[in-house]
Amino acid sequence: MELEDLKNTWTALDNRLGNREILNDRIVKEIIQLKTNKALNFLNRFEFLGAILCFISLPFLVFLLGQKAIKISFWGNVMCYFALGVVCIGCIIQSCKLWLLWKIDLNSSISKNIHFFRKYQLFIQKEKMISCILLPVLFVLVTLEIFHIGKMPLWRWAIIISALIVGILITVWQYKTIYGAKIRAIKKNLDELKELEAETE
């Protein structure tokens, strides 16, 4: 009788430990999902803001180029067309990035989420490479326009140089701090969720 009671106690204890492990896994999963959702929501808002800026800039640049009354130099025209091309590409890229982020659903398959997130990462890497090419081109066009204008007051030089420096710093900060940190965090969380999913199967 004592042996039977001991077996029953052991089975009950084993069941309780099993239930506790399942509960702990569920809590861990919920915490990871919460952290991932927070980072994804931040990226969604950031990309949405970028898309709004691109779609607002597009008609403004078209209007500016369509105005014959405004006298723009050759290099000024080149700069406007260059900016128009960048904004058009930006509208497409921002839309694709948002679509990929919206496809990530933490309640569905983790493998699919990792697949869409890797595609998003690839977009960011390509965008970073394109930015490294476009920024120097913009700098050259601005320099050519300045030399075409001729003599300029010192304060205008200061504004143009400051704007270029601020633009470069913001771009570096954006890819290092915003994209770098958030992408690493989401990637780590998705990998952890995949491990938990494999353990529970």
Image: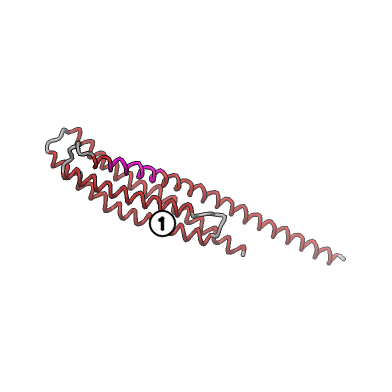
Where's residue 159, x and y in %? 23, 36
Quadrant in the picture for the N terminus: bottom right
Three-letter code for the amino acid on which mark 1 is drawn: Gln
Question: From the viewer's perspective, is 81 left or right of 149?
Answer: right
Image-quadrant location for residue 65: top left
Question: From the viewer's perspective, is 196 left or right of 131?
Answer: right
Say which of 66 and 152 sits in front.
Answer: 66
Residue at 66% x, 58% y is 22
Secondary structure mainly formed by the magenta segment: helix
Residue at 38% x, 54% y is 124
Say which of 24 and 42 sits in front.
Answer: 42
The residue wearing badge 1 is: 121
Say which of 156 and 53 sits in front.
Answer: 53
Per the image, is 60 magenta? yes
- Residues drawn in magenta: 49-62
Quadrant in the picture for the C terminus: bottom right
Where's residue 157, x and y in %? 19, 37
Where's residue 182, x and y in %? 44, 50
